[in-house]
Amino acid sequence: MIAAQDASHAASVVQPAGRLQGKVALITNATRGLGFAIAKAYVREGAKVVLAGSIASELKVALDELSELGGDATATKISLGSQAACEQLFNGALRSYGKIDVLVNNASVVGPMVPIVQYSPRDWDETLRGNLDVVYWLSKAVLGSMIPSNGGSIINVTASVAKRGRARWGAYSVAKAGVENLTEILAEETSIYNIRVNCVDPGALNESDSLDEVLNPFIFLASDVSRGTTGLHLLSSDWVGRSF
């Protein structure tokens, strides 16, 4: 962890009551773009957040901004390329806050945009690992604490190419289709433990875009309002301007 433990920095300021008050959320790829927008939204709603990212300088900037918002957050500099790394991230989050109520699987690797005949086995493996294996590894680890706690929410970020494969999207498209299928499997397997597992497709995003309008389903699925909602594939575009 950053700072004293070589990977964490925490800011603790009392938050006003919000829809996520008392929740702890672990978010991957959380220092920029969608991941950081989710982190800020969660902090504003009263959650404590654990950010995962691979660049220390970006983690520090993200934590400083969350601190300015009055957030309680920690960050772990880590590359999620193995099951061991995912378990390390999970265990660090537990040490920081004692529980994880929400997991947002936002880590993503697009991979080369080439025809399948040009796809190297190495690129194929790395792209599947970065999009699908990481979701499996982290979900499995987090469920180890959610099941005994009898509750929790896993939110998997998906994309339109999961529904219909497109030329040159290769292993990314295949992996996202796998993520959606895994979501449905986990939803059925964990509903008896009051755990919900869902997908959100935020739509096409650019780093310069204002991301506030895509955040509603992520807040909804993290909140207690979504209890009993599981196995769904939500589109952020359907939630613009929607209250819950």
Image (spheres, rainbow, N blue to C red):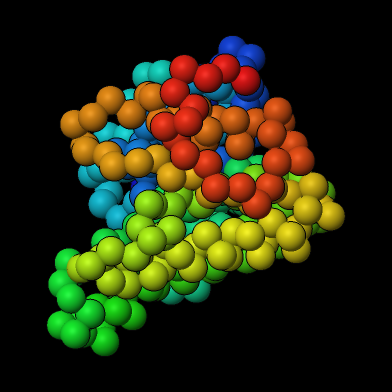
User: Which of the 4 image quarters holds residue 67?
Assistant: top left
Q: Kindly identify the residue that appears in the image at 60 percent across and 43 percent down.
A: 102
Assign the C terminus to one quadrant of the image. top right
x and y percent of residue 164 in the render? Answer: 38, 61
- Residue 224 horizontal side relative to residue 97, left or right: right
Query: What residue is shown at x 23% (from left), y 67% (from top)?
Result: 167
In depth, the one of 153 and 145 nearer the eye is: 153
In the rendered image, the vertical position of residue 65 relative to residue 180, given as above or below: above
Classify 129 as above or below 104.
below
Left or right, residue 208 beside residue 75: left
* Front residue (pair 94, 173): 173
Say whether residue 154 is visible. yes
Q: 213 or 91, which lies in front?
A: 213
**Residue 162 position within the rendered picture, expressed as x and y whole percent measured from the top left:** 41, 60
- Residue at image x 65%, y 45%? 153
Q: How many marks?
A: 0
Residue 111 percent coordinates (x, y): 23, 67
126 in relation to 102, above or below: below
Residue 101 in percent (x, y) is at 66, 43
Residue 62 sits in which quadrant? top left
Looking at the picture, does residue 87 appear above or below residue 227?
A: below
Report if residue 6 is visible in the image: no
In this picture, residue 207 sits left or right of residue 15: left
Q: Residue at position x 84%, y 55% from top?
A: 192
Q: Nearer the viewer, residue 175 or 141?
A: 175
